[in-house]
Protein backbone atom coordinates (compact mmCIF):
# COMPACT_ATOMS: atom_id res chain seq x y z
CA UNK A 1 0.00 0.00 0.00
CA UNK A 2 1.39 3.41 -0.94
CA UNK A 3 2.53 5.70 1.88
CA UNK A 4 1.63 9.35 2.24
CA UNK A 5 5.36 10.13 2.07
CA UNK A 6 7.10 7.17 0.42
CA UNK A 7 10.53 6.22 1.74
CA UNK A 8 13.40 5.89 -0.67
CA UNK A 9 14.49 2.28 -0.55
CA UNK A 10 18.15 1.28 -0.87
CA UNK A 11 19.04 -1.56 -3.20
CA UNK A 12 19.45 -3.96 -0.30
CA UNK A 13 15.81 -3.41 0.64
CA UNK A 14 14.47 -3.60 -2.89
CA UNK A 15 15.82 -7.11 -3.20
CA UNK A 16 13.31 -8.37 -0.66
CA UNK A 17 10.29 -9.81 -2.37
CA UNK A 18 6.84 -9.13 -0.96
CA UNK A 19 5.48 -11.98 0.89
CA UNK A 20 4.95 -13.67 4.88
CA UNK A 21 7.20 -15.60 8.49
CA UNK A 22 6.94 -15.88 11.98
CA UNK A 23 9.18 -15.52 14.94
CA UNK A 24 10.43 -18.53 16.70
CA UNK A 25 9.69 -19.44 20.28
CA UNK A 26 11.71 -16.43 21.03
CA UNK A 27 9.05 -14.22 19.57
CA UNK A 28 6.22 -16.13 21.01
CA UNK A 29 7.58 -16.16 24.46
CA UNK A 30 9.46 -13.58 24.08
CA UNK A 31 11.10 -11.99 22.23
CA UNK A 32 13.49 -9.44 23.97
CA UNK A 33 16.64 -3.94 25.06
CA UNK A 34 18.42 -3.98 28.31
CA UNK A 35 19.16 -0.42 27.66
CA UNK A 36 20.04 2.23 25.18
CA UNK A 37 23.72 2.79 25.76
CA UNK A 38 26.75 3.71 23.78
CA UNK A 39 28.99 0.82 22.87
CA UNK A 40 32.76 0.47 23.21
CA UNK A 41 33.24 1.78 19.68
CA UNK A 42 34.79 5.23 19.46
CA UNK A 43 32.62 7.76 17.68
CA UNK A 44 29.25 6.36 18.77
CA UNK A 45 26.76 9.09 19.64
CA UNK A 46 24.99 9.14 22.98
CA UNK A 47 21.20 9.32 23.07
CA UNK A 48 19.78 12.85 23.41
CA UNK A 49 19.06 13.96 26.94
CA UNK A 50 16.82 16.59 28.46
CA UNK A 51 13.13 17.28 28.09
CA UNK A 52 11.44 15.17 25.38
CA UNK A 53 10.48 16.98 22.21
CA UNK A 54 7.05 16.52 20.64
CA UNK A 55 6.55 15.85 16.94
CA UNK A 56 8.40 14.05 14.19
CA UNK A 57 8.41 10.69 12.44
CA UNK A 58 10.34 7.60 13.52
CA UNK A 59 11.33 5.18 10.75
CA UNK A 60 12.02 1.72 12.19
CA UNK A 61 13.57 -1.11 10.13
CA UNK A 62 12.72 -4.30 11.99
CA UNK A 63 13.07 -8.03 11.41
CA UNK A 64 10.28 -9.25 9.16
CA UNK A 65 9.52 -10.90 5.88
CA UNK A 66 6.77 -9.42 3.73
CA UNK A 67 6.12 -12.99 2.54
CA UNK A 68 4.86 -13.89 6.01
CA UNK A 69 3.16 -10.67 7.09
CA UNK A 70 -0.01 -10.94 9.13
CA UNK A 71 -2.74 -8.56 10.28
CA UNK A 72 -4.08 -10.92 12.94
CA UNK A 73 -2.71 -10.12 16.42
CA UNK A 74 -4.00 -13.40 17.83
CA UNK A 75 -2.26 -15.82 15.48
CA UNK A 76 1.40 -16.76 15.20
CA UNK A 77 2.69 -13.25 15.90
CA UNK A 78 4.45 -13.51 12.55
CA UNK A 79 7.26 -11.05 12.15
CA UNK A 80 8.75 -8.63 14.62
CA UNK A 81 7.48 -5.97 12.24
CA UNK A 82 3.92 -7.22 12.80
CA UNK A 83 4.47 -7.49 16.54
CA UNK A 84 5.74 -3.91 16.72
CA UNK A 85 2.65 -2.70 14.87
CA UNK A 86 0.33 -4.67 17.16
CA UNK A 87 2.07 -3.32 20.29
CA UNK A 88 1.44 0.23 19.09
CA UNK A 89 -2.14 -0.21 17.86
CA UNK A 90 -3.66 -2.52 20.51
CA UNK A 91 -3.76 -2.41 24.29
CA UNK A 92 -2.48 -5.33 26.37
CA UNK A 93 -3.38 -6.31 29.92
CA UNK A 94 0.11 -6.25 31.45
CA UNK A 95 3.65 -5.38 30.39
CA UNK A 96 7.09 -6.39 31.69
CA UNK A 97 8.57 -4.14 34.35
CA UNK A 98 12.23 -3.24 34.81
CA UNK A 99 12.32 -5.28 38.03
CA UNK A 100 11.05 -8.39 36.27
CA UNK A 101 7.57 -8.06 37.73
CA UNK A 102 4.44 -7.45 35.67
CA UNK A 103 3.21 -3.88 35.46
CA UNK A 104 -0.35 -2.62 34.80
CA UNK A 105 -1.47 -1.56 31.34
CA UNK A 106 -5.12 -2.13 30.45
CA UNK A 107 -5.44 -4.13 33.68
CA UNK A 108 -4.90 -1.93 36.74
CA UNK A 109 -4.79 -4.71 39.35
CA UNK A 110 -5.10 -8.48 39.75
CA UNK A 111 -5.39 -10.97 42.57
CA UNK A 112 -5.83 -14.76 42.91
CA UNK A 113 -8.18 -16.85 44.97
CA UNK A 114 -6.69 -19.03 47.71
CA UNK A 115 -6.25 -21.98 45.36
CA UNK A 116 -4.51 -19.73 42.78
CA UNK A 117 -6.65 -21.16 39.98
CA UNK A 118 -8.87 -18.09 39.56
CA UNK A 119 -7.44 -14.63 38.94
CA UNK A 120 -9.55 -11.46 39.04
CA UNK A 121 -8.29 -8.67 36.78
CA UNK A 122 -9.67 -5.14 37.22
CA UNK A 123 -9.63 -3.08 34.01
CA UNK A 124 -9.25 0.62 33.35
CA UNK A 125 -12.54 2.47 32.96
CA UNK A 126 -11.18 5.17 30.61
CA UNK A 127 -9.88 3.10 27.68
CA UNK A 128 -11.59 3.58 24.32
CA UNK A 129 -11.17 2.08 20.89
CA UNK A 130 -10.28 4.42 18.03
CA UNK A 131 -13.90 4.35 16.85
CA UNK A 132 -15.05 5.76 20.20
CA UNK A 133 -16.41 2.61 21.83
CA UNK A 134 -15.32 1.94 25.42
CA UNK A 135 -13.13 -1.10 26.07
CA UNK A 136 -15.17 -3.56 28.12
CA UNK A 137 -14.50 -6.81 29.93
CA UNK A 138 -16.45 -8.55 27.15
CA UNK A 139 -13.88 -7.30 24.62
CA UNK A 140 -11.03 -8.62 26.77
CA UNK A 141 -12.66 -12.02 27.26
CA UNK A 142 -13.46 -12.30 23.55
CA UNK A 143 -9.86 -11.47 22.59
CA UNK A 144 -8.34 -13.94 25.05
CA UNK A 145 -10.71 -16.69 23.96
CA UNK A 146 -9.82 -16.03 20.34
CA UNK A 147 -6.11 -16.33 21.20
CA UNK A 148 -6.80 -19.64 22.95
CA UNK A 149 -8.85 -20.90 20.00
CA UNK A 150 -5.92 -20.18 17.67
CA UNK A 151 -3.43 -22.13 19.80
CA UNK A 152 -2.29 -24.23 16.84
CA UNK A 153 -1.04 -21.04 15.20
CA UNK A 154 0.35 -19.19 18.23
CA UNK A 155 2.06 -22.09 20.01
CA UNK A 156 -0.45 -22.24 22.81
CA UNK A 157 0.52 -18.93 24.43
CA UNK A 158 -2.58 -19.11 26.66
CA UNK A 159 -2.44 -22.87 27.22
CA UNK A 160 -2.33 -22.44 31.01
CA UNK A 161 -5.73 -20.73 31.05
CA UNK A 162 -9.14 -22.37 30.88
CA UNK A 163 -10.92 -19.78 28.79
CA UNK A 164 -14.22 -21.67 28.76
CA UNK A 165 -14.35 -21.41 32.55
CA UNK A 166 -13.34 -17.73 32.51
CA UNK A 167 -15.91 -14.95 32.66
CA UNK A 168 -16.60 -11.22 32.48
CA UNK A 169 -18.08 -9.70 35.62
CA UNK A 170 -19.55 -6.37 34.60
CA UNK A 171 -17.77 -3.98 32.25
CA UNK A 172 -14.43 -3.72 34.05
CA UNK A 173 -13.73 -7.08 35.70
CA UNK A 174 -12.47 -10.31 34.11
CA UNK A 175 -12.09 -13.56 36.05
CA UNK A 176 -9.58 -15.88 34.40
CA UNK A 177 -9.48 -19.56 35.28
CA UNK A 178 -6.21 -21.52 35.10
CA UNK A 179 -5.88 -25.24 34.47
CA UNK A 180 -3.65 -25.66 37.52
CA UNK A 181 -2.57 -23.42 40.40
CA UNK A 182 -0.63 -20.59 38.79
CA UNK A 183 1.39 -17.94 40.60
CA UNK A 184 2.32 -15.86 37.57
CA UNK A 185 -0.91 -15.32 35.67
CA UNK A 186 -0.12 -11.64 35.04
CA UNK A 187 3.30 -12.52 33.63
CA UNK A 188 1.82 -15.13 31.30
CA UNK A 189 -0.34 -12.37 29.83
CA UNK A 190 2.48 -9.86 29.38
CA UNK A 191 2.43 -8.18 26.02
CA UNK A 192 0.59 -10.86 24.03
CA UNK A 193 -3.00 -10.13 25.10
CA UNK A 194 -3.87 -7.75 22.28
CA UNK A 195 -7.44 -6.53 22.81
CA UNK A 196 -9.87 -6.02 19.92
CA UNK A 197 -13.62 -5.24 19.94
CA UNK A 198 -15.88 -8.18 20.74
CA UNK A 199 -16.97 -10.02 17.59
CA UNK A 200 -14.04 -8.93 15.39
CA UNK A 201 -13.32 -11.56 12.77
CA UNK A 202 -12.11 -9.73 9.66
CA UNK A 203 -8.55 -8.43 10.05
CA UNK A 204 -8.04 -7.74 6.36
CA UNK A 205 -9.15 -4.18 7.03
CA UNK A 206 -8.11 -1.84 9.83
CA UNK A 207 -9.50 -2.99 13.18
CA UNK A 208 -10.07 -0.40 15.94
CA UNK A 209 -7.54 -0.60 18.73
CA UNK A 210 -7.10 1.21 22.02
CA UNK A 211 -3.33 1.57 21.90
CA UNK A 212 -1.15 4.69 21.75
CA UNK A 213 -1.09 4.79 17.94
CA UNK A 214 -3.56 3.99 15.20
CA UNK A 215 -2.87 2.43 11.83
CA UNK A 216 -3.08 4.77 8.85
CA UNK A 217 -1.78 2.36 6.20
CA UNK A 218 -0.60 -1.23 6.43
CA UNK A 219 1.17 -3.23 3.75
CA UNK A 220 3.33 -6.34 3.63
CA UNK A 221 6.54 -4.27 3.55
CA UNK A 222 5.66 -1.04 5.38
CA UNK A 223 3.08 0.16 7.89
CA UNK A 224 2.38 3.74 8.93
CA UNK A 225 0.87 4.62 12.31
CA UNK A 226 -0.10 8.01 13.71
CA UNK A 227 -0.61 9.13 17.29
CA UNK A 228 -3.92 8.15 18.90
CA UNK A 229 -5.01 11.28 20.75
CA UNK A 230 -7.77 9.27 22.49
CA UNK A 231 -5.30 6.98 24.23
CA UNK A 232 -5.69 6.89 28.00
CA UNK A 233 -1.93 6.75 28.68
CA UNK A 234 0.91 9.26 28.53
CA UNK A 235 0.64 11.19 25.30
CA UNK A 236 3.14 9.87 22.72
CA UNK A 237 5.70 12.43 21.59
CA UNK A 238 5.94 11.22 18.00
CA UNK A 239 3.40 12.21 15.38
CA UNK A 240 4.06 9.17 13.25
CA UNK A 241 5.90 5.84 13.15
CA UNK A 242 6.82 4.05 9.92
CA UNK A 243 7.65 0.34 10.29
CA UNK A 244 9.71 -1.33 7.57
CA UNK A 245 9.79 -5.15 7.42
CA UNK A 246 13.32 -6.10 6.38
CA UNK A 247 14.43 -9.74 6.48
CA UNK A 248 18.18 -9.23 6.01
CA UNK A 249 20.10 -7.86 9.05
CA UNK A 250 22.71 -6.09 6.90
CA UNK A 251 19.96 -4.42 4.91
CA UNK A 252 18.48 -3.15 8.18
CA UNK A 253 21.83 -1.68 9.20
CA UNK A 254 22.30 -0.15 5.76
CA UNK A 255 18.91 1.54 6.04
CA UNK A 256 20.13 3.51 9.08
CA UNK A 257 23.65 4.25 7.85
CA UNK A 258 22.22 5.52 4.55
CA UNK A 259 19.61 7.67 6.26
CA UNK A 260 16.61 5.63 5.10
CA UNK A 261 15.64 4.60 8.66
CA UNK A 262 16.16 5.96 12.18
CA UNK A 263 16.36 2.61 13.99
CA UNK A 264 17.54 -0.81 12.79
CA UNK A 265 16.65 -3.76 15.00
CA UNK A 266 18.87 -6.85 15.41
CA UNK A 267 21.93 -5.93 13.39
CA UNK A 268 25.23 -7.80 13.22
CA UNK A 269 28.23 -7.19 15.49
CA UNK A 270 30.18 -6.31 12.35
CA UNK A 271 27.71 -3.52 11.62
CA UNK A 272 28.14 -2.25 15.16
CA UNK A 273 31.93 -2.33 14.86
CA UNK A 274 31.71 -0.02 11.87
CA UNK A 275 29.13 2.31 13.44
CA UNK A 276 31.87 4.67 14.62
CA UNK A 277 32.56 5.53 10.99
CA UNK A 278 28.91 6.10 10.12
CA UNK A 279 28.14 9.58 11.34
CA UNK A 280 27.91 8.97 15.08
CA UNK A 281 25.17 6.36 15.26
CA UNK A 282 23.93 5.11 18.60
CA UNK A 283 24.37 1.46 19.51
CA UNK A 284 21.61 -0.12 21.57
CA UNK A 285 22.77 -3.21 23.48
CA UNK A 286 20.38 -5.78 24.91
CA UNK A 287 22.80 -7.57 27.17
CA UNK A 288 23.12 -11.33 26.73
CA UNK A 289 19.71 -12.00 25.18
CA UNK A 290 20.64 -13.46 21.79
CA UNK A 291 21.15 -17.20 21.39
CA UNK A 292 21.54 -19.48 18.39
CA UNK A 293 21.34 -22.94 20.00
CA UNK A 294 21.82 -26.05 17.92
CA UNK A 295 18.71 -28.13 18.40
CA UNK A 296 18.65 -31.93 18.24
CA UNK A 297 15.26 -33.63 17.87
CA UNK A 298 15.25 -36.40 20.45
CA UNK A 299 12.57 -38.36 18.59
CA UNK A 300 14.75 -38.67 15.48
CA UNK A 301 17.87 -40.75 14.83
CA UNK A 302 20.68 -40.37 15.73
CA UNK A 303 19.59 -37.96 18.47
CA UNK A 304 17.30 -40.46 20.15
CA UNK A 305 20.51 -41.77 21.73
CA UNK A 306 21.67 -39.64 24.72
CA UNK A 307 25.28 -40.61 24.01
CA UNK A 308 25.09 -38.90 20.62
CA UNK A 309 23.59 -35.77 22.13
CA UNK A 310 26.34 -35.62 24.73
CA UNK A 311 29.00 -36.19 22.08
CA UNK A 312 27.70 -33.23 20.10
CA UNK A 313 27.84 -31.05 23.20
CA UNK A 314 31.36 -32.17 24.05
CA UNK A 315 32.51 -31.42 20.50
CA UNK A 316 31.61 -27.74 20.93
CA UNK A 317 34.36 -25.13 21.14
CA UNK A 318 32.22 -22.50 22.82
CA UNK A 319 34.81 -19.73 23.02
CA UNK A 320 35.60 -20.01 19.31
CA UNK A 321 31.89 -19.74 18.47
CA UNK A 322 31.33 -16.74 20.75
CA UNK A 323 34.43 -14.93 19.48
CA UNK A 324 33.60 -15.58 15.84
CA UNK A 325 29.86 -15.00 15.87
CA UNK A 326 29.47 -12.25 18.47
CA UNK A 327 32.82 -10.46 17.96
CA UNK A 328 33.25 -9.60 21.62
CA UNK A 329 29.59 -8.92 22.34
CA UNK A 330 28.90 -12.24 24.05
CA UNK A 331 29.84 -14.92 26.55
CA UNK A 332 29.93 -18.71 26.61
CA UNK A 333 26.89 -20.67 27.81
CA UNK A 334 26.30 -24.07 29.34
CA UNK A 335 23.62 -25.88 27.32
CA UNK A 336 20.61 -24.41 29.12
CA UNK A 337 18.59 -22.04 26.96
CA UNK A 338 17.87 -19.20 29.42
CA UNK A 339 21.06 -18.55 31.45
CA UNK A 340 19.87 -14.99 32.25
CA UNK A 341 16.66 -16.21 33.92
CA UNK A 342 16.54 -15.91 37.73
CA UNK A 343 15.80 -19.64 37.93
CA UNK A 344 19.05 -20.64 36.17
CA UNK A 345 21.00 -23.23 38.25
CA UNK A 346 24.30 -21.36 38.40
CA UNK A 347 26.08 -24.10 40.35
CA UNK A 348 26.15 -26.52 37.41
CA UNK A 349 29.68 -27.35 36.22
CA UNK A 350 30.59 -25.69 32.95
CA UNK A 351 30.61 -28.28 30.19
CA UNK A 352 33.89 -28.07 28.28
CA UNK A 353 35.25 -29.47 25.05
CA UNK A 354 36.48 -33.07 25.10
CA UNK A 355 37.05 -34.46 21.60
CA UNK A 356 38.34 -37.83 22.83
CA UNK A 357 35.32 -38.43 25.06
CA UNK A 358 32.97 -37.33 22.29
CA UNK A 359 34.52 -39.86 19.89
CA UNK A 360 34.21 -42.59 22.52
CA UNK A 361 30.54 -41.83 23.08
CA UNK A 362 29.88 -42.04 19.34
CA UNK A 363 31.72 -45.38 19.23
CA UNK A 364 29.57 -46.69 22.09
CA UNK A 365 26.47 -45.54 20.21
CA UNK A 366 27.49 -47.56 17.15
CA UNK A 367 29.00 -44.71 15.12
CA UNK A 368 32.68 -45.59 15.25
CA UNK A 369 32.90 -44.87 11.53
CA UNK A 370 31.34 -41.44 11.97
CA UNK A 371 28.03 -39.83 11.07
CA UNK A 372 26.61 -37.93 8.12
CA UNK A 373 23.99 -35.34 8.97
CA UNK A 374 22.47 -32.09 7.74
CA UNK A 375 22.57 -28.99 9.91
CA UNK A 376 19.90 -26.50 8.86
CA UNK A 377 20.35 -22.79 9.39
CA UNK A 378 19.30 -19.44 7.92
CA UNK A 379 20.22 -15.75 7.75
CA UNK A 380 17.16 -14.35 9.55
CA UNK A 381 19.32 -13.10 12.43
CA UNK A 382 22.97 -12.00 12.06
CA UNK A 383 25.43 -14.84 12.59
CA UNK A 384 23.09 -17.84 12.41
CA UNK A 385 24.77 -19.15 9.27
CA UNK A 386 28.27 -18.34 10.55
CA UNK A 387 27.61 -20.28 13.76
CA UNK A 388 26.42 -23.35 11.86
CA UNK A 389 29.40 -23.32 9.51
CA UNK A 390 31.92 -23.13 12.35
CA UNK A 391 30.13 -25.78 14.40
CA UNK A 392 30.17 -28.14 11.43
CA UNK A 393 33.96 -27.81 11.35
CA UNK A 394 34.14 -28.60 15.06
CA UNK A 395 31.96 -31.68 14.60
CA UNK A 396 34.27 -32.93 11.87
CA UNK A 397 36.93 -33.42 14.55
CA UNK A 398 34.85 -36.17 16.16
CA UNK A 399 34.04 -37.87 12.88
CA UNK A 400 30.73 -36.16 12.11
CA UNK A 401 30.25 -34.84 8.58
CA UNK A 402 27.65 -32.11 8.98
CA UNK A 403 26.40 -30.56 5.76
CA UNK A 404 25.26 -27.00 6.43
CA UNK A 405 22.09 -26.13 4.53
CA UNK A 406 21.20 -22.43 4.56
CA UNK A 407 17.43 -22.22 4.26
CA UNK A 408 15.42 -19.17 3.09
CA UNK A 409 14.63 -16.78 5.93
CA UNK A 410 11.08 -16.38 4.59
CA UNK A 411 10.14 -19.98 5.30
CA UNK A 412 12.66 -21.15 7.92
CA UNK A 413 10.40 -20.81 10.94
CA UNK A 414 7.54 -22.69 9.29
CA UNK A 415 9.39 -25.33 7.25
CA UNK A 416 12.45 -26.09 9.42
CA UNK A 417 11.90 -24.99 13.01
CA UNK A 418 10.67 -27.84 15.23
CA UNK A 419 10.49 -30.12 12.17
CA UNK A 420 14.02 -31.01 11.05
CA UNK A 421 16.24 -33.32 13.08
CA UNK A 422 19.11 -30.85 13.49
CA UNK A 423 18.85 -27.11 13.09
CA UNK A 424 19.87 -23.70 14.40
CA UNK A 425 17.40 -22.03 16.72
CA UNK A 426 17.01 -18.49 17.97
CA UNK A 427 16.01 -16.90 21.27
CA UNK A 428 15.91 -13.22 22.00
CA UNK A 429 15.32 -13.00 25.74
CA UNK A 430 12.51 -15.46 26.48
CA UNK A 431 12.05 -16.42 30.13
CA UNK A 432 12.44 -20.02 31.23
CA UNK A 433 8.77 -20.42 32.25
CA UNK A 434 7.65 -19.12 28.84
CA UNK A 435 10.04 -21.43 27.04
CA UNK A 436 8.88 -24.40 29.09
CA UNK A 437 5.21 -23.69 28.34
CA UNK A 438 5.75 -23.34 24.62
CA UNK A 439 8.57 -25.77 23.90
CA UNK A 440 9.50 -28.17 26.71
CA UNK A 441 6.43 -29.70 28.31
CA UNK A 442 5.11 -33.01 27.01
CA UNK A 443 1.95 -31.17 25.97
CA UNK A 444 3.71 -28.11 24.55
CA UNK A 445 2.34 -27.19 21.12
CA UNK A 446 5.86 -26.67 19.75
CA UNK A 447 8.08 -29.14 21.56
CA UNK A 448 11.18 -28.14 19.62
CA UNK A 449 13.51 -30.88 20.94
CA UNK A 450 10.78 -33.50 21.53
CA UNK A 451 11.68 -33.37 25.23
CA UNK A 452 9.02 -35.37 27.06
CA UNK A 453 9.75 -35.93 30.72
CA UNK A 454 6.94 -36.56 33.23
CA UNK A 455 9.14 -35.56 36.16
CA UNK A 456 9.94 -32.27 34.41
CA UNK A 457 6.23 -31.65 33.73
CA UNK A 458 5.28 -32.31 37.33
CA UNK A 459 8.09 -30.15 38.65
CA UNK A 460 7.07 -27.28 36.40
CA UNK A 461 3.44 -27.48 37.54
CA UNK A 462 4.57 -27.49 41.17
CA UNK A 463 6.82 -24.48 40.61
CA UNK A 464 4.14 -22.49 38.80
CA UNK A 465 1.81 -23.01 41.74
CA UNK A 466 4.34 -21.57 44.19
CA UNK A 467 3.68 -17.93 45.09
CA UNK A 468 7.04 -17.27 46.77
CA UNK A 469 9.44 -16.19 44.00
CA UNK A 470 12.62 -17.55 45.61
CA UNK A 471 11.07 -20.95 46.24
CA UNK A 472 9.59 -21.00 42.74
CA UNK A 473 12.99 -20.30 41.17
CA UNK A 474 14.58 -23.04 43.28
CA UNK A 475 12.02 -25.54 41.98
CA UNK A 476 12.57 -24.39 38.40
CA UNK A 477 16.33 -24.73 38.83
CA UNK A 478 15.89 -28.33 39.92
CA UNK A 479 14.05 -29.38 36.77
CA UNK A 480 16.63 -27.69 34.57
CA UNK A 481 19.33 -30.06 35.81
CA UNK A 482 17.84 -33.02 33.92
CA UNK A 483 17.50 -30.82 30.85
CA UNK A 484 21.20 -29.92 31.09
CA UNK A 485 22.15 -33.58 31.36
CA UNK A 486 19.88 -35.25 28.81
CA UNK A 487 18.14 -32.59 26.74
CA UNK A 488 18.38 -31.78 23.06
CA UNK A 489 20.19 -28.43 23.23
CA UNK A 490 23.69 -27.31 22.41
CA UNK A 491 23.62 -23.80 23.88
CA UNK A 492 27.14 -22.56 23.24
CA UNK A 493 26.84 -18.85 24.02
CA UNK A 494 24.75 -15.77 24.48
CA UNK A 495 25.31 -12.51 22.64
CA UNK A 496 24.07 -9.01 23.06
CA UNK A 497 21.08 -8.03 20.98
CA UNK A 498 22.34 -5.11 18.91
CA UNK A 499 20.36 -2.30 17.33
CA UNK A 500 21.49 0.85 15.57
CA UNK A 501 19.78 4.21 16.04
CA UNK A 502 20.32 7.61 14.48
CA UNK A 503 21.75 10.42 16.58
CA UNK A 504 18.41 12.08 17.35
CA UNK A 505 16.47 9.06 18.68
CA UNK A 506 15.77 9.00 22.44
CA UNK A 507 13.65 7.07 24.89
CA UNK A 508 14.02 3.58 23.43
CA UNK A 509 12.71 0.95 25.90
CA UNK A 510 15.19 -0.66 28.25
CA UNK A 511 14.13 -4.20 29.00
CA UNK A 512 14.28 -7.75 27.61
CA UNK A 513 11.51 -9.67 25.93
CA UNK A 514 8.53 -7.95 24.38
CA UNK A 515 9.34 -4.77 26.26
CA UNK A 516 11.39 -3.42 23.36
CA UNK A 517 8.26 -3.41 21.19
CA UNK A 518 6.60 -0.73 23.33
CA UNK A 519 8.10 2.39 21.77
CA UNK A 520 5.21 4.80 22.38
CA UNK A 521 7.38 7.13 24.49
CA UNK A 522 10.29 7.41 22.04
CA UNK A 523 11.07 10.94 20.86
CA UNK A 524 13.20 12.61 18.23
CA UNK A 525 15.51 15.54 18.99
CA UNK A 526 15.09 18.49 16.66
Image (spheres, rainbow, N blue to C red):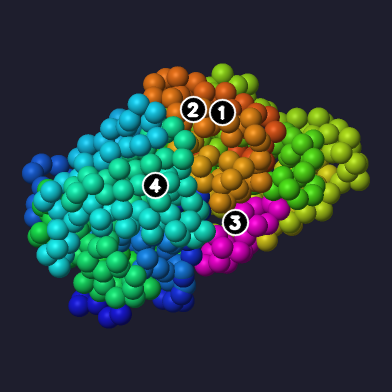
Disc 4 crowd rating (10 Å Cα; few below 14, some 14-19, many 20+) is few
Q: Is residue 421 magenta?
A: yes
Q: Nearer the viewer, residue 513 or 388?
A: 513
Q: Nearer the viewer, mark 3 or mark 2?
A: 2
Q: Are marks 2 and 1 in contact (CB under 8 Å)?
A: yes
Q: Where does the image place residue 465, in percent across and percent down from the top left?
A: 45, 28
Q: Are marks 3 and 1 in contact (CB under 8 Å)?
A: no
3D distance between C-alphas at marks 4 and 3:
33 Å
Specify start and end residues of the magenta stretch as a single range.
Answer: 406-425
3D distance between C-alphas at marks 1 and 4:
25 Å
Q: Nearer the viewer, mark 4 or mark 2?
A: 4
Rendered position, 44 above or below 65: above
Disc 3 crowd rating (10 Å Cα; few below 14, some 14-19, many 20+) is many
3D distance between C-alphas at marks 3 and 2:
28 Å
Q: Where does the image place residue 20, in percent across and percent down from the top left?
A: 46, 70
Residue bearing mark 4: 165
SS label for mark 2: helix
Which tag, 3 or 2, sits closer to the chain's start?
3
Residue bearing mark 1: 459
Taking the image as shown, residue 13 lies to the left or right of residue 439, namely: left
SS label for mark 4: strand
Residue bearing mark 3: 417
Residue bearing mark 2: 463
Which tag, 3 or 1, sits closer to the chain's start?
3
Disc 2 crowd rating (10 Å Cα; few below 14, some 14-19, many 20+) is many
Disc 1 crowd rating (10 Å Cα; few below 14, some 14-19, many 20+) is some
Q: Are marks 4 and 2 in contact (CB under 8 Å)?
A: no
Q: Residue at x 38, y 59 (%)?
A: 146
- The image quadrant that residue 493 belongs to is top right
Amino acid sequence: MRLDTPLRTPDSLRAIRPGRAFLTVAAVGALLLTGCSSSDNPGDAAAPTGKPVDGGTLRYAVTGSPATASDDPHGGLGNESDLLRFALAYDVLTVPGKDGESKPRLAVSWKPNKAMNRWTFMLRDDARFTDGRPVRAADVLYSLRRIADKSAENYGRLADFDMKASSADGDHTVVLATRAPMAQAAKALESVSFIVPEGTKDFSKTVPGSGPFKVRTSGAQTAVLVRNDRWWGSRPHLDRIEIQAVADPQARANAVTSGQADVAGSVSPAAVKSAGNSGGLQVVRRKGVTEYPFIMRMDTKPFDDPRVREAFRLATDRKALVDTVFLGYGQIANDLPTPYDPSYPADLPQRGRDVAEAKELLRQAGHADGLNITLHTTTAYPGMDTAATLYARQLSEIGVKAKVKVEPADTYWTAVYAKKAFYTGYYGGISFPDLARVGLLSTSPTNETAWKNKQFDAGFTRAMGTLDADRRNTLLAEIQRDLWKDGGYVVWGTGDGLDLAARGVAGLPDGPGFQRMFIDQVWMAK
